[in-house]
Image (spheres, rainbow, N blue to C red):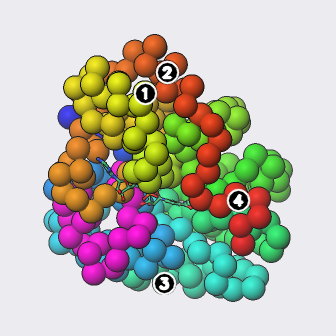
Amino acid sequence: SKVPTITLNNGVAMPQLGFGVWQVPDAEAAAAVGTALEAGYRSIDTAAVYENETGTGKAIADSGIAREELFVTTKLWNSAKETWTRESVLREFDASLARLGLDYVDLYLIHWPRAMRDDYLTIYRTFEEIARSGRAKAVGVSNFHQHHLERLLAETSVVPAVNQIELHPHLAQSGLRAFHARHGIATEAWSPLGQGKAVLEDATVARLAGKHGRTPAQIVLRWHIQLGNVVIPKSVTPSRIRENIDVFGFELDADDMTALAALDNGTRLGPDPEDFD
Ligand code: NAD
């Protein structure tokens, strides 16, 4: 069944489920993204630092799917320079577009706040300019804590469309999700499957998989969908790529959602954005 969209705060529609390509080598990205597009994915999440924008763009070009049916996200890797300036951000954005072979992206994100460098306001103001030019249909951030968002909201004019954060049943991010909801920021979950480790081996997830006749990955993705999160699960295995998008034909009930909420133990798989540079 078809992937629903959520409407971002600027009216742009974003598929609620997309395909993430972190750690997919560029030479394999075209095949993996091609499989995902065949399976019905229309949203792809890449980043300059993943070094697979070229392979991703090749799969998009080869797919024959109309550009307006696709939703392509990439991210500025804001560590490659000491301090970013308007000019270096514009150059880096152009370089991403060129690697992707596209004349616009649907979403452009600041990859990490890196507040110690004190340049995310400069970067974001340049993103606003990129959005005004139409070369990004929406702009947003990733890995921002509430206090980073509060500073952004106070000092810039475009409310970020999205904050893409680590989020899975072991790190449910309820505080940040509530803040996003109050401010019209969509919550996008990275490592939505907990990178395929402890989250998918959890006994509660296994019990619900048995109850619904679904796989653990499908239970976890369905939990995200019912919370209203955007999800971007990654796999290079064709059967799993298809399995991960097949989550719109069943529903978790209130007891299931409560049982999954109880798994939140604050475990981060990635770095804390507070001190990640
Ligand atoms: P994920 O939670 O999507 O887990 C992916 C792993 O889970 C796979 O490598 C595989 O081992 C396993 N898996 C996938 N499908 C499965 C299935 N059906 N059954 C069993 N195991 C399965 O982890 P991720 O790749 O870290 O996150 C997804 C995407 O989020 C990334 O590809 C990337 O696009 C994005 N991301 C963004 C940031 C950021 O800083 N903004 C950080 C990490 C990831």
CA distance separating discs 4 and 2? 28 Å
Residue situated in front as seen by the camera: 152 or 50: 50
Q: Which residue is mark 2?
A: 259
Q: Are marks 4 and 2 in contact (CB under 8 Å)?
A: no
**Amino acid type, mark 1:** Thr
Q: Which residue is mark 4?
A: 273
Q: Please report the residue visible at 82 percent of the width from the left and 70 percent of the height from the top.
A: 116
Q: Which residues are magenta?
A: 18-36
**Pointer 2 or 1: first along the chain:** 1
Q: Are marks 1 and 3 in contact (CB under 8 Å)?
A: no
Q: Secondary structure at mark 4?
A: loop
CA distance separating discs 4 and 1? 29 Å
Instruction: Nearest to the eye among marks 4 and 2: give it.
Output: 2
Give the left or right position of residue 81, taking residue 37 as reference.
right
CA distance separating discs 4 and 3? 25 Å
Give the left or right position of residue 84, taking residue 89 as reference.
right
**Amino acid type, mark 3:** Ala
**Pointer 4 or 2: first along the chain:** 2
The C terminus lies in quadrant:
bottom right
